């Protein structure tokens, strides 16, 4: 832009402000948003228990932490376990050992546990693999528990609906199952009904 063009533009802007005031620079605003209708609100999500599981962790799992800029970072490996049907107790999938783990942060700000879970399952019926990953929030200490939102990817033909359905993992590390030679965690996996 040449100096003379810039001066002309600047003069036009000054004159517009002088003759029209702030309206010269006003942006058209959309109409006011109408008050919401109670009958048009989104449905409240409901969940169904999909699997229960027992997972074997590295020994003394609560001791597997290291300092981080945000608090303490967990590095808890998964050594195996299985997922069962919550109604029949039948094993549905095995947790692939030595793959994945919990890599969350225990916040130095509020002591909350911010989970980062990676888990691999192998289904018993078709042998297919599922990769689950997600993040959540919970507590860490004498009772460690968290709820984590998970996503699943799998090539299992009978489980493709789980790939596009929100999943919740509720996990607990009961203190009586925390030993220096072995650590066990319990979890339930839920699927959203109205997804």
Image: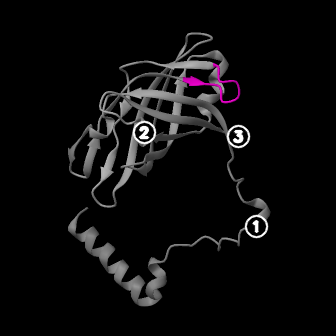
Which residue is located at x 64 percent, y 19 percent?
A: 90
Which residue is located at x 69 percent, y 46 percent?
A: 46
- Check the image and report above or below for 185 versus 90: below
Q: Quadrant of the N terminus?
A: bottom left
Which residue is located at x 59 percent, y 29 percent?
A: 163
Label 1: which secondary element = loop
- Check the image and report above or below for 56 versus 105: above
C-alpha distance separating marks 1 and 3: 24 Å
Q: Which residues are magenta?
A: 83-90
Give the label, 1 or 3, closer to the camera. 3
Q: Which residue is under mark 1?
A: 37
Q: Quick check: is 162 in the magenta stretch?
A: no
Give the label, 2 or 1, closer to the camera. 2
Q: Which mark is residue 176?
A: 2
Quick one: label 2 or label 1, which is nearer the N terminus?
Answer: 1
C-alpha distance separating marks 3 and 2: 33 Å
Q: Which SS type dominates the magenta stretch?
A: loop
C-alpha distance separating marks 2 and 1: 50 Å
**Residue 169 image offset from top left, x and y in percent:** 53, 39
């Amino acid at each position: 832009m040449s100096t003379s063009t810039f001066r002309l533009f600047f003069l036009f802007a000054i004159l517009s402000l002088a003759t029209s005031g702030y309206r010269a620079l006003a942006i058209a605003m959309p109409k006011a948003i109408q008050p919401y209708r109670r009958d048009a609100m989104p449905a409240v999500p409901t969940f169904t228990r999909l699997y229960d599981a027992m997972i074997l962790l590295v020994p003394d799992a609560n001791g597997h932490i290291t300092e981080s800029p945000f608090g303490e970072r967990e590095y808890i490996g998964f050594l195996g376990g299985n997922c069962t049907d919550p109604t029949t107790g039948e094993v549905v999938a095995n947790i692939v050992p030595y793959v994945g783990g919990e890599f969350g942060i225990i916040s130095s700000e509020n002591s909350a546990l911010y989970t980062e879970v990676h888990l691999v399952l192998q289904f018993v019926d078709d042998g297919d693999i599922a990769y689950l990953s997600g993040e959540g929030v919970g507590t860490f200490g004498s009772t460690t528990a968290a709820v984590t939102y998970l996503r699943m990817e799998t090539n299992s033909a009978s489980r493709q609906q789980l790939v596009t359905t929100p999943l919740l993992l509720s996990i607990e590390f009961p203190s009586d199952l925390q030993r220096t030679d072995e650590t066990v965690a319990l979890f339930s996996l839920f699927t959203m009904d109205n997804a």
